[in-house]
Amino acid sequence: MEDLYRNPHWLSFSGKIISFHCKGTPAIDDGETSELVFRSFSYDREHNALVEACEGAAVISRKTPAHVVKCDFAADCRSRVTAPCVLVNKTCSKRGNFQYSLFTVNSSNQFQPCLDFKLHYEIREPVSILQGPTVLWSHEDSVFYISLQTGGVRQIPLQLSHTLIAELPLHKAQIFILGVQKSSDQCSEQQTTSQSLGYMIEDGQVFDGSVVVPHPYMSIAQCILVLSADSVDSVLECAAVAATSNQQLVYFENAAVKDTCELPYEQPENIQVVHTGRNGCLYAISFRQGHVCTVWKESFQIASCWSGVSSFHVDDFLGCGTDQMLLFFPDESGGGQPLEKFLITDLCGIAFSRGQDAEAHKTPAPTPENYLLTLQALQSRLQSGMTVLRELQEELRVKERVLQQAVQTLTDMVSDRDTVVTQHEQEGLFALWESDDESKTEASDDKMQDTPAVSSKPHVDKLWHRLTVDQLVVGVTLNADSSQLVTSVSLSILTEKGQNSAPAVIQTQSQVFHLPVAHLPSSPSSPSSSSSAFTFPEPEAKRSRHHAASRPNDLNTCRLAVTAATELTPLLNSACVKCSVMLHYTQRKDALALASNSTPAVVFCGQLDLDIRSDFQTLLLKTPELKTDEVREDLLSLLAVLDRWVFHINSPENSLGDINGWILKRAGCKKIEVSPQYLLSNSSGPSAVMVLHWHQITPFQGELSIHSSKLQMLRFLDSLLARLPASCTVRPVSGVGGHGTARMFALALEKELVSLKEGVASALCEEDGAETKRHEETPETGTAEGLQRCREAWQQHTERSKSRLSPLVDVGRYRSLIQSMSEAQLDVDLAALLDNQRTPLG
């Protein structure tokens, strides 16, 4: 390994280059005195050379040799002035102790002692000098540091492996250490777990290191540079770049990988930012073995590479207000001065070199494999697009043939000719509705075989109840077979006050929820309908396609859960109350029967004993991570008693981003695992429970459902509006849900039909009115001339009737018609998307 102590250490500061080295001079007592010498150089553009600006020296040891360990610039906490710093190792002969001293160079070009400390070992790993000044180093999987505030060497209270040291550019810069903490399981020696941790030097705070660098990248990151940082609601948000051992430069934003670039060299050591002004910024990465690589910040592509570099620096060496890169190259002959071969450039038009060609040591960047992967992806997309285009063209040809056959059939019917229609199999079509009796019989037989027999009354799977806030919630769950032909479902609660008195009916409010059939192992796969939907029998071909393409969370594959909520006040007369639960429903004779033609019915669900003195603390508030039926019932109880508000959020200028992730970062917000689309915020007991549901319609539109009290809803909206862009609009939606989305879809379709009718009528009414006024005179038929005029009027009427089959419309009215139809169709698409994407609870 090269002895770095014998070579001068270079540092760029305030547009100058400073070299530090130690030299020994003979002493009077046959010893050796060690002096710390620095020399400052500035670039002279007229002579194209680095000329000496100033120098200084100080005696640091009179009996032992000294070596320069590290030099860097750091801010002094006392004077708040950034100055060059140099760490020197003064080897002691007594029992192998090592004495280290940190010096700073003041404005008078004099050395000032800053820190002194002794160690029983020699620092072998890289050392960092950061603000304070603070010196940090690693030794045996431990990190040590010393600064003016500590007064001595301290060790961080964490055992970290593969540490990263950096600064957070907050309003007050903070030094932090990242690493992986490993702990063995006491029960099993073979099982080990690792966790990414961070440690703040100033306040000793321990935080999750994955908020800066994701855990998979922690063990391979070699160096890191934090670009920006901010603390939002006690959550750290930062952007950083890191060079990994896999020859990658990775850009992280809020602990998420946003971009990567393949690096041409291994073993990265340092990352610097080069600000070139209007031309953009560069990331300069230094590697071992004398390699340097630059990457454009905007495109995240390699800009240039150099090899054989002895020293690399970034500063404003020309005094023009922007940064340049200074690269020193070794003298191959071995007799030249150290500053005789260098290059100053910013890759944007500035290039000054001495002792070599400006492009001599510049190596071309290797062609990354990402280009090939991008080309393959584009080829795949092109082939997929061509396949879709061919399918559309084939469908268009089939439609044209069907239309031609339909026109030919109509013509033959008018002319009393026989029509020969080709079979649908020859055209590649399938029949939606079977016409012959044999197919109807087969379809009915298949339907009887596929559909299991259902009882005349709905079957209740489970009866449960909860005490939530100040209300009693009673719920029943119906199986999938019972949910198929029932509608208008509700619950009522009857209390038994005595043997001779009649049961009293308590006022309740019922709600219907959809539960997936997949949660019941024995549930059949037949479709079930909601309380307001009707199921129509379909032919075999369409039914088979429908089942093959059905989704797991489709509402047609859900069972029903009905809840009834009532206040506890009428039930507080006695300690123990017996209640009977009755299910009210409307049963249709078949799926085609309308609800108005059905007969209301009542079924007894069971009896429950309500003991008010019991503990009804729900599992949902304690552990929302559980996936049990009891937690699901707790969620249904909360949704039944909490007030609900729905808001439509529209952001026309900016995308909304990850709203769901932002909600999860709020204090107390957790995902309900039994229904992952719901988030729970339980900050201070049941009275402050809030259930949230975010539904992303498009990247610019979404729907937010809030189940909570009114005060909590207003507080949450206030914090959400502070996060959303200023151009966002938040509009409350009334009457949404299962019935509301279907109603919105129906109203949008009706609006589209009315717009089409009115638009076509307005486009043709002026033409018809003009023709009517022109031909409203009726000629007399008493004379030969009148008969001739009548014949001409009849011919004109015939021509006008033919022209009505393909009328000519004014361009302006046609454009207005197309614009109104496009707006109406956009509303229909949005309503259809809302109605199609609503999912059941589960």
Image (cartoon, grey):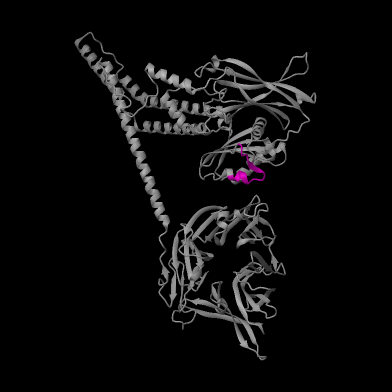
Which residue range is magenta in the image?
661-674
On the question of residue 711 being in view, the answer is no
On the question of residue 184 being in view, the answer is yes
For the C terminus, the quadrant is: top right
Q: Nearer the viewer, residue 708 or 372?
A: 372
Q: Residue at the spot x=46%, y=27% of the render? A: 749
Task: State left or right for residue 271 relative to residue 361.
Answer: right
Q: Is residue 335 above or below residue 327?
A: below
Can you give x and y, in whole percent of width and height, for residue 185 in the image?
66, 53
Q: Is residue 599 above or below residue 283?
A: above
For the N terminus, the quadrant is: bottom right
**Residue farthest along the left direction in this orientation:** 784
Can you give x and y, in whole percent of width and height, for residue 314 in the image?
52, 69
Give the image quarter of residue 702.
top right
Can you give x and y, in whole percent of width and height, for residue 803 in the image?
28, 23
**Residue farthest along the right direction in this orientation:** 574
Q: Nearer the viewer, residue 181 or 394?
A: 181
Q: Residue at the spot x=38%, y=46% of the render? A: 380
Q: Nearer the viewer, residue 641 or 170?
A: 641
